[in-house]
Amino acid sequence: MNQFDLSTARSQESVLATNKVLKNTYMLLSATLVFSAIMAAVSMAMTMPPMAYMISVIGAMVLGIFVLPRTANSSKGIGVIFLITGLMGFGLGSILSIYLALPKGPEIIGTAFGGTGIIFLGLSGYALTSKRDFSFMGGFLFAGMMVVLLAVLANLFMDLPALSLAISAGIILLMSGFILFDTSRIISGGETNYIMATYGLYLAIFNIFISLLHLLGALSGDD
């Protein structure tokens, strides 16, 4: 086998490996989203208080930062990612209960759900079909995260409705960027662990949905 054949074989292996990561990522992402929806329904049936959202998200963050990276290369990672997304779904249920009690609540939730789906499918589809390298966005996304974090901390003291809306809009833009960035990394082979890839995309979808709920609720006058 000559050098050209070796190069071609390696290229084909790389494409197959990338396609496998993509397939596994989207399959696991779909499963975790369904599981989150089930846990949200359980939370709503139990009429969990709003505090459940904060507790669940903090618990999920701890698992995502300290446990998932250590287990992502083993079968234990599957259980951890379902635990994380289940917790976040359970917490989300308490928020959905609040919106459902509003006059336009079901409409707001439906619009946020549809909007989140359109954003994710549109951006992922663009990254997949264009095959553009969005790695250059890494620095901008990190800076954006710092700005949003500082704005959130500032608004804890100032409690400005306008700033709160701006933060939600900023999070939607930031998470949209992460969808492009994370999908691009999978395509380019920069992310080879489908569990970690799923975690990143799930967080982006979750935050877009929550932020859209806030924006739509405020614009409708119900939030």
Image (spheres, rainbow, N blue to C red):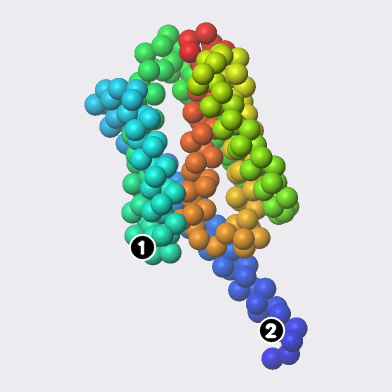
Most foreground residue, 66 or 191: 66
Residue 33 lies, with reference to residue 10, above or below; the image says above
Q: Earlier in the sequence, mark 2 or mark 1?
A: 2
Asked whether the viewer can see residue 194, the reply is yes
Amino acid identity at mark 2: Leu
Q: Secondary structure at mark 2?
A: helix
Mark 1 is surrounded, within 10 Å at the Cα level, by few (under 14), some (14 to 19) or many (20 or more) other residues, namely: few
Tell me the residue at 41%/11% (across/down): 102
Tell me the residue at 56%/68% (across/down): 17
Q: Residue furthest bottom?
A: 1
Q: Secondary structure at mark 1?
A: loop
Q: Which residue is mark 2?
A: 6
Quadrant in which residue 142 is drawn: top right
Q: Of discs 2 and 1, which sits in the foreground?
A: 1
Residue 217 in the image, given as x and y percentages of width and height: 51, 16
Most foreground residue, 122 or 165: 165
Residue 170 in the image, given as x and y percentages of width and height: 63, 29
Residue 158 in the image, given as x and y percentages of width and height: 55, 16
Work out which quarter of the rendered image holds the N terminus and state it.
bottom right
Tell me the residue at 69%/84% (across/down): 6
Quadrant in which residue 174 is drawn: top right
Quadrant in which residue 186 is drawn: bottom right
Is 50 on the left-hand or right-hand side of 208? left
Task: Give the alpha-carbon distance from disc 2 to disc 1, as whole Å.
Answer: 33 Å
Residue 56 in the image, given as x and y percentages of width and height: 35, 35
Tell me the residue at 33%/54% (across/down): 79
Evaluate if marks 2 and 1 touch, with contact meaning CB atoms under 8 Å apart.
no
Is 33 on the left-hand or right-hand side of 151? left
Amino acid identity at mark 1: Ser
The label shown at residue 127 is none
Q: Which residue is mark 1?
A: 75
